[in-house]
Image: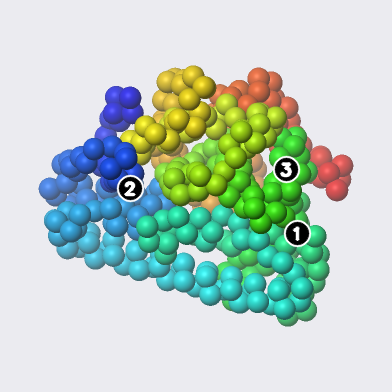
Amino acid sequence: MIEEWINNGKDRNLLTLIGRIAGSKGASPRDLHNLKDGKGWTELMETAAAHGVLALAKDLLTEQEWREVPKEVRIKWQLSVDEIEERYFKQVEVYNALKDIFESNGIKVQLLKGIKLSEYYPVPCHRECGDIDIFIFDDYEKGNRLIESKGKKVDRTGHKHSKFNFKGVTIENHKSLLNVVTNRYDRILEPELRKMVENSETQAEFHLLFNIRHIIVHLISSGIVLRHLTDLYLFLKKEMEKIDFVKVFDILKKSRQYKIFAQLLYFISECFGDREIVSLVKGTPRADKIIEKLYEDTFHNISKRVATEDLLTMPVYRRKLIGARAVIRSKWKYDLIRRGYFCKDFIIRTGYAFGINRQKSK
């Protein structure tokens, strides 16, 4: 089905590459097309970079294909991969140092997203990471004070997490796992996640549920990229046998996340060419129109998104306007959760953005 929607070579080639990660259980091997000149290879490299899978895409090229990449493109690609590896190892070093400090002071640390998800990649250091997200259970403020005692400045302005710089890396210390201040569905999910994260036997279910919600929030607010889908796909393929899906799906249904998750799983099946993965939601009808919208939003609309670094240079009013437009374009996503949810959330977001709801939320 997804083949019918792809109308450019760069998306087709990227999906061909990423589909190889499914191996014999996924799509049959397909050759890359129209990559005989530097332009085609440059487009593939840049598209992979935009989707956060640049290093993974290189891993999935055959030796013959890598030799066919024009020298100037190959050098640029390899240098970018080297930078991704360097950032990854820096983050691992920083996280271990931070963890040692916390644990030596009786503070337990739970790693979220990023480095944790890299464990499921064929080459862990090729999973691109941003900030380091941690959860230290009931020691949130104790952890903040400990960092301040080391001479570090802690920014507590965020309602979900504090933020500080440690050895050159931004750390987000979660006060809550989700956005319980302004989101009603996160308030339903939060206690379920807390029970899971505190039980060593439900760690796989915790990471699955947390990352499903993380992806859905990204989808609704700013859109997702192929890295988000790859994270979820690789996690499921590795941890599927450890998860009580009846329990997880019951929580997703209670928090109105199941419908959108099921269609995301059908979309992942299309992207990776893996028909087995959708057996998890076999009782849920596939909605081709929704999957087509997911494809459009993930691949075609990526060029319309404004980079965070560009947003930060803009006047506040312009950032608010861009954010409002993005929310309005996302109405169909809100409807997948609950009709009427868009209007309520838009009012809440607008009020919070302009300071109307902040005093009430404290």
Q: How is the image coloured?
A: rainbow
The mark nearer the N terminus, 3 or 2, is: 2
* Residue 334 seen by the camera: no
The residue to which callout 1 is attached is 137
> Horizontal and vertical percent for residue 81?
34, 64
Q: Quadrant of residue 342?
A: top right
The residue to which callout 2 is attached is 21
Q: Nearer the viewer, residue 298 or 263?
A: 263
Give the residue type that dot 3 points to. Glu
The mark nearer the N terminus, 2 or 1, is: 2
On screen, residue 92 above or below 291: below
What residue appears at the point 55 percent right and 47 percent down from the top-left corner? Answer: 242
* Residue 341 seen by the camera: yes
Q: Nearer the viewer, residue 149 or 358?
A: 149
Do the residues under discs 2 and 1 have CB atoms within 8 angstroms? no
Q: CA distance from mark 1 to mark 3?
A: 14 Å
Taking the image as shown, residue 276 lies to the left or right of residue 190, namely left
Do the residues under discs 1 and 3 have CB atoms within 8 angstroms? no
> Horizontal and vertical percent for residue 108?
72, 67
> Horizontal and vertical percent for residue 149?
78, 79
> Horizontal and vertical percent for residue 2?
33, 28
What residue appears at the point 29 percent right and 56 percent down from the top-left corner? Answer: 58
The mark nearer the N terminus, 1 or 3, is: 1
| SS category of the residue bearing label 1 | helix
Do the residues under discs 3 and 2 have CB atoms within 8 angstroms? no
The residue to which callout 3 is attached is 192
What residue appears at the point 46 percent right and 21 percent down from the top-left corner? Answer: 286
Give the residue type that dot 2 points to. Ile
Q: Nearer the viewer, residue 272 or 87?
A: 272
Decide: few, some or many residues near mark 3? Use Cα within 10 Å; few <14, some 14-19, many ≥20: some
Decide: few, some or many residues near mark 1? Use Cα within 10 Å; few <14, some 14-19, many ≥20: some
| SS category of the residue bearing label 2 | helix
